[in-house]
Image (tube, helix red, strand yellow):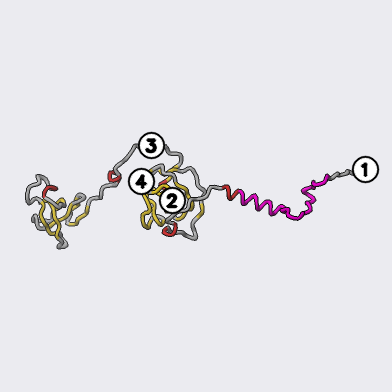
Amino acid sequence: MRTTFSLLLLPGLCLAVMGCPKKGGEADAGEVEAAVVEAVVDAAPAVPAAKNANDVARFPGETALADDDLKLVDAFTTVRTGPKQGGTVATLRAGTDVVKMAEYQGAFLITFADPKDPNTHLMGWIDKGAFVQDVLIVDAGPRDAAKDVAPPPPVDAGFGLVCPPNNAVVVNLAPTPVCKTKCKEDKECPGAAAGSCVAAQTPDNKVVKVCR
């Protein structure tokens, strides 16, 4: 048995499966879709323009990234003009708000507010290890950056000597080479007596001032 259906179309209505006649000035489905996509792109947050963009290295092999909620965890993070190398752009404190843009050779390209002028932005590369997920950042107040710098390692001076930092090996103040503390003035030497800080000769025939 064959059943017949009647379909009544009201003026101004049409079926999507049949297509609609295009009137003058009306956009077709492709134009509408393009307009929607453009509106979505326009609504996405824009990456702030960096005033030093021309100074930062970019690479064909870098991978574009979407920003996330990872936070800087290193107490002081150095931002450079290249991945793990190049000139220093800025030093950022833990918890600084940054926007990730790309990844290359174990480093992230980021943008951030210029610490010296928050109304402008900078960009640069930082090591991936500077980030960690969901870390609570506690601001302990102003800190002395010099205290966060690791002390220099002991100096292997040869002659079987390992001198402490800020020491020099001299050869004319004892029968054998010895380590002596560097100085500029007598007051820097123990006792601060006159003549405590003297010129001495190093194994490579250079002159250096040390505490006697």
SS class, disc 2: strand
Chain-order first, disc 3 or disc 4:
4
- Please name the residue that numbered disc 4 is placed on: 76
- Please name the residue that numbered disc 2 is placed on: 121
Q: Could you tell me how far apart the alpha carbons at marks 3 and 1 are, in whole angstroms? A: 79 Å
Q: Observer-nearest residue: 173 or 31?
A: 31
Chain-order first, disc 3 or disc 2:
2
- The answer to whether residue 152 is left or right of residue 25 is left
- Please name the residue that numbered disc 3 is placed on: 138
Q: Amino acid at mark 2?
A: His
The quadrant of the image that shows the N terminus is: top right
Nearer the observer: mark 3 or 2; the answer is 2
Q: Observer-nearest residue: 33 or 177?
A: 33
Q: Amino acid at mark 1?
A: Met
Q: Amino acid at mark 4?
A: Phe
Above or below, comparing residue 60 to residue 38 in the picture: below
Q: Are marks 3 and 4 in contact (CB under 8 Å)?
A: no
Residues in magenta, as a range: 10-39
For disc 1, the neighbor class at 10 Å (few under 14, some 14 to 19, many from 20) is: few
- Please name the residue that numbered disc 1 is placed on: 1
Residue reaching furthest left?
A: 194
Residue 89 in percent (x, y) is at 38, 53
- The answer to whether residue 66 is left or right of residue 208 is right
**Magenta stretch contains residue 63:** no
Above or below, comparing residue 148 to residue 206 in the picture: above
Q: Are marks 2 and 4 in contact (CB under 8 Å)?
A: no
Chain-order first, disc 2 or disc 4:
4
Nearer the observer: mark 2 or 4; the answer is 2
Chain-order first, disc 1 or disc 4:
1
